[in-house]
Amino acid sequence: MKIKREVKEAVKLGQNANLEEMVFCRAMADAYGCKPLSSDKDNFNFFLSAIFHYGKIQGIRQERSKRRTRHAKNI
C-alpha cells in the first residue's frame, strides 16, 4: 500500500531532521495553539519535525522531476 510506504519513508527521513527544523516546528505549533499531551512532548516535537522534513524532501524531489521533464523536452 502506498501510504504505508510513505509513512515508513517519513519516519526514516524524520531521523535526519535538524535542530533548526525542530525549533521552527515547535514555534509553528505554539503559534497555532497545538499542544502535546503532557507525557508525550518529545514524541510530538519529533512528529512535527519528521513531517516537516519529509515535506521538504518531497518538494525537492518534485522540483528535480520538473527540471528533468523540462530538460528532456528541450533536447
Image: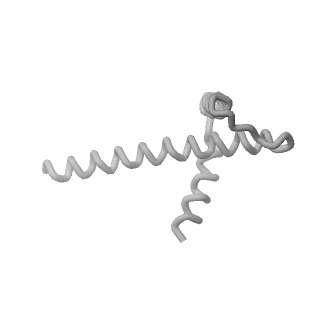
Colour mapping: one colour
Q: Nearer the viewer, residue 12 or 59?
A: 59
Quadrant in the picture for residue 31: top right
Residue at 14% across, 48% down: 74
Q: In the displayed image of the protein, which residue is found farthest to the bottom?
A: 1
Quick check: 16 left or right of 40? left
Quadrant in the picture for residue 4: bottom right
Quick check: 3 left or right of 39? left
Q: Across the whole image, how many numbered discs are drawn on residues? A: 0
Residue at 85% across, 40% down: 38
Q: In the displayed image of the protein, which residue is found farthest to the right?
A: 39
Q: In the displayed image of the protein, which residue is found farthest to the left?
A: 75
Q: Quadrant of the N terminus?
A: bottom right
Quick check: 3 left or right of 59? right
Give residue 24's position: percent from left, percent from top: 61, 29
Give residue 51's position: percent from left, percent from top: 59, 46
Residue at 65% across, 45% down: 15
Q: From this view, report whether residue 45 is shown above or below residue 62.
A: above
Give residue 28's position: percent from left, percent from top: 61, 31
Residue at 35% across, 44% down: 63
Give residue 41's position: percent from left, percent from top: 79, 39
